[in-house]
Image (cartoon, rainbow, N blue to C red):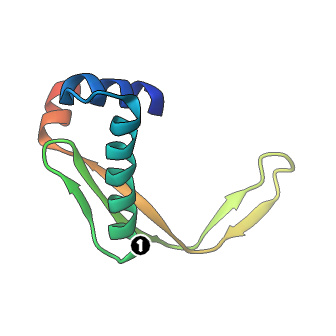
């Protein structure tokens, strides 16, 4: 699903008058979740899942073009964990 498709669904399901209003709602949700992650907090959407920032350890990888071994430094990444309703619907 694209952002445009999600905006259309929000507009229809929430009974909003315009796509602009629906896009503002979606942008606010995304921005709020991003801000929470940047502050080191989790973004939890009950039933859908949760997002949190975790530290990924340094590791050794392989350059796919040359086959050369390279060192990949540690970094922070966002981890998504499925909520019960999503997991139940998919599994």
Residue 14 position within the rendered picture, expressed as x and y whole percent measured from the top left: 19, 30
Residue, disc 1: 38
- The quadrant where residue 51 appears: bottom left
Q: Which part of the image, by quadrant, shows the C terminus?
A: top left
Q: Residue at x 40, y 49 (%)?
A: 27
In the picture provided, is 60 more to the left or to the right than 30?
Answer: right
Residue 55 position within the rendered picture, expressed as x and y whole percent measured from the top left: 44, 73
Q: Is residue 44 above or below residue 25?
A: below
Q: Is residue 64 above or below residue 60?
A: above
Q: Residue at x 63, y 74 (%)?
A: 73
In the picture provided, is 72 more to the left or to the right than 37?
Answer: right
Residue 21 position within the rendered picture, expressed as x and y whole percent measured from the top left: 34, 38
- The quadrant where residue 83 appears: top left
Q: Nearer the viewer, residue 62 or 88?
A: 88
Q: Which part of the image, by quadrant, shows the N terminus?
A: top left
Q: Nearer the viewer, residue 46 or 15?
A: 15
């Amino acid at each position: 699903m694209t952002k445009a498709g999600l905006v259309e669904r929000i507009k229809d399901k929430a009974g909003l008058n315009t796509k602009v209003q629906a896009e503002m709602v979606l942008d606010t949700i995304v921005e709020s979740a991003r801000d929470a992650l940047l502050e080191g907090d989790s973004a939890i959407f009950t039933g859908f899942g949760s997002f949190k920032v975790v530290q990924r350890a340094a590791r050794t990888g392989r350059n796919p073009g040359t086959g050369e071994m390279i060192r990949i430094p540690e970094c922070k990444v966002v981890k998504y964990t499925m909520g019960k309703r999503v997991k139940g619907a998919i599994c």
